[in-house]
Every structure is written in structure tokens, then in C-alpha cells.
Image: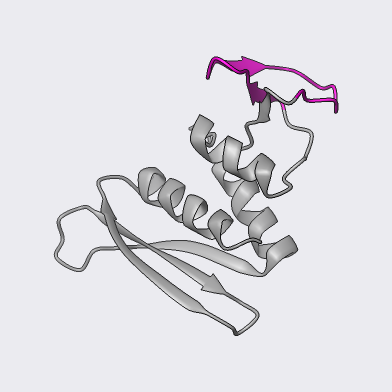
Amino acid sequence: MKETLITFETAELAKEKGFDFLVNNYYNHNNELKEHKYNANITVLEFHAPTQSLLQKWLREEHNIAVYNKPVADNSGRWSVYVDDMGGHHYITYYIYEPTYEEALERGLQEALKLIP
């Protein structure tokens, strides 16, 4: 079993919002996933590519934003995603139905990143 890395689009947004952890993967300017760049000096055209769970934890611990999924109640196998501002200012529910848990989580991560000023 392998953890899912965030997409290029999410990596761009995460960098814009201040995500700067050293991770084993990054995207270059051509949207190509590269491995083992341990240098903290990611260029303007490179983006850290953490796992979805690491970005989810960063959002929760650094910005008080929880992102989580629930299966859709119709037993279709689809997932809905929820974004919760744990500071009590907003509770945002996204009824985005995606065919897999990971796709729903990715959409939730993107929506949560958009909440950061």
C-alpha cells in the first residue's frame, strides 16, 4: 500500500499558501514528478509534493482547518468531502462526490487551501 501524493495543481496552491516542508518528491515546471530533492531551496518553478495525509495534517495543525471524507449514503461507492474551520468561524461542507476516497480528499485539500489568506 502506498500513500497518495498531492497533484501538481494542489502543490502549486500549497506553495502559494506557505507549505514548505522538506519532502522526498517535487514537481518541476513541466508538471513532472521528481524524487529525492532534499534541498530546501525549491525554485520558483518547483513545488513540494507531499502526501495527501501530510498536507491534511499541516492544514489542521498550522491553520486549524480539518479536511475529511465520508462515504455517500446511497451506497454508490462515492465520497463526499468536508472542510471544517476548527477555529469556529466557518463550517464548510462540500458535497463533492468523487469516485474514490483519494480524489475526494484532493478536492477537499484544494478547497481548504483556498481558505488561507
- Vertical placement of 24 versus 94: above or below? above
Classified by dominant secondary structure, the portion drawn in magenta counts as: loop
For this view, does 25 lie left or right of residue 78? right
Residue at x 60% of width, y 18% of height: 29
Q: How far across and down, in percent of the image, does residue 14 sit?
A: 63, 44
- Vertical placement of 104 versus 9: above or below? below
For this view, does 101 lie left or right of residue 39? left
Which quadrant of the figure has residue 87?
Answer: bottom right
- Vertical placement of 15 versus 17: above or below? above
**In the foreground, 74 or 22:** 22
Count of marks placed on residues: 0
Q: How far across and down, in percent of the image, does residue 54 sit?
A: 65, 46
Magenta region, residue range:
24-43
Would residue 2 be seen by someone viewing this image from the given angle?
Answer: no
Which quadrant of the figure has residue 100?
Answer: top left
Q: Is residue 113 magenta?
A: no
Residue at x 68% of width, y 50% of height: 17
Would residue 99 be seen by someone viewing this image from the given angle?
Answer: yes
Which quadrant of the figure has residue 11?
Answer: top right
Q: How far across and down, in percent of the image, does residue 9 sit?
A: 50, 35
